[in-house]
Image (cartoon, grey):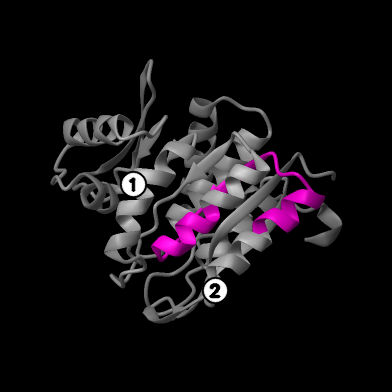
Amino acid sequence: MKPRSKILIIAGSDSSGGAGIQADIKTVTSLGGYAMTAVTAITVQNTTGVTSVIPIPAKEIAKQITFTAKDIKPDAIKIGMLHSPDVIHQVLSALNQIKIAKIVLDPVMVAKGGARLINDPAIQVLKNKLMSKALLVTPNIPEAEILTGKKITNTDGMILAAYTLMHWGAKNVLLKGGHLKGNYVQDILVTPKKIFMYKNKKLKTKNTHGTGCTLSSAITTFLGCGKPIDKSCELAIRYVNNAIRSNPHYGKGHGPVNHLTSIHLDTKFK
């Protein structure tokens, strides 16, 4: 099977394998893409939490991006954890050199267990400089609250927050609604022309580690294949829901999802 798209992932590493670069690679590969990486930080973590974050020098991150893209030009780019203003500036400089239009920004700020993964000055640079570079920004509700400074308690608040981010330069916003109470999850895609709502039954499980990373990487893979933004979000949400539903029940805390949900092995390998 030949890969359908080439995806460059700019994100941090998760030693437990459930989120970050590891989840991104698994997602892209499982959906038929070819994954390349620029590692921004190494984290020491497992399903119960993060104990430390070790940053990669900012210039080395930029070199990973430009040197990789010079040899194999990506069809799309996914951006995850960027922990400092210097890193964001270096990533911006590298993106300006390689000129890729399809960029998905997942503004990773807080780990599932509550650990802060980005400092306040970096949040401001991300909001004022990087957001306008992305084709799509994919915050969850806590991240959108940090970016906008407003509490979100319902879908109207989600839409208002999305428009606020677009006013600051975001081209399109997929605001993930998993943190709202209720029996259903409503993810809302706001574009300049239309609002799309994706409603799915909420799955009662603690095995949701890495869902944000997985979703943004899935969207990027579908975009890289040439699918429109609304269809890419729809297919990616479906993939993540199936991955949560079929999770392997690993770990003592917030366990990982099943990234292999899209793969069907030939009978002789079963």
Residue 229 bears which disc, if any? none
Residue 22 visible in the shown view? no
> Residue at image x 54%, y 55%?
91
Residue type, numbered disc 2? Ile
Dividing the picture into quarters, in which one does residue 160 lie? Answer: top left
Mark 2 surroundings within 10 Å by alpha-carbon count, few (fewer than 14), some (14 through 19), many (20 or more) = some
In-front residue for pair 57/199: 57
Q: Secondary structure at mark 2?
A: loop
Dividing the picture into quarters, in which one does residue 60 lie? Answer: bottom right
- Is 161 left, or right, of 173 in this rendering? left
> Residue at image x 56%, y 61%?
23
Mark 1 surroundings within 10 Å by alpha-carbon count, few (fewer than 14), some (14 through 19), many (20 or more) = some
> Residue at image x 54%, y 44%?
239
Residue 127 bears which disc, if any? 1
Dividing the picture into quarters, in which one does residue 195 lie? Answer: top left
Report if residue 72 lies within the magenta region.
yes
Tag 2 residue: 56
In-front residue for pair 263/38: 38
Which image quadrant: the C terminus? bottom right
| For residue 257, above or below residue 185 | below
Residue type, numbered disc 1? Lys
Q: Which residues are magenta?
A: 65-91
In-front residue for pair 19/254: 19
- Is 8 left, or right, of 216 in this rendering? right
Residue 67 visible in the shown view? yes
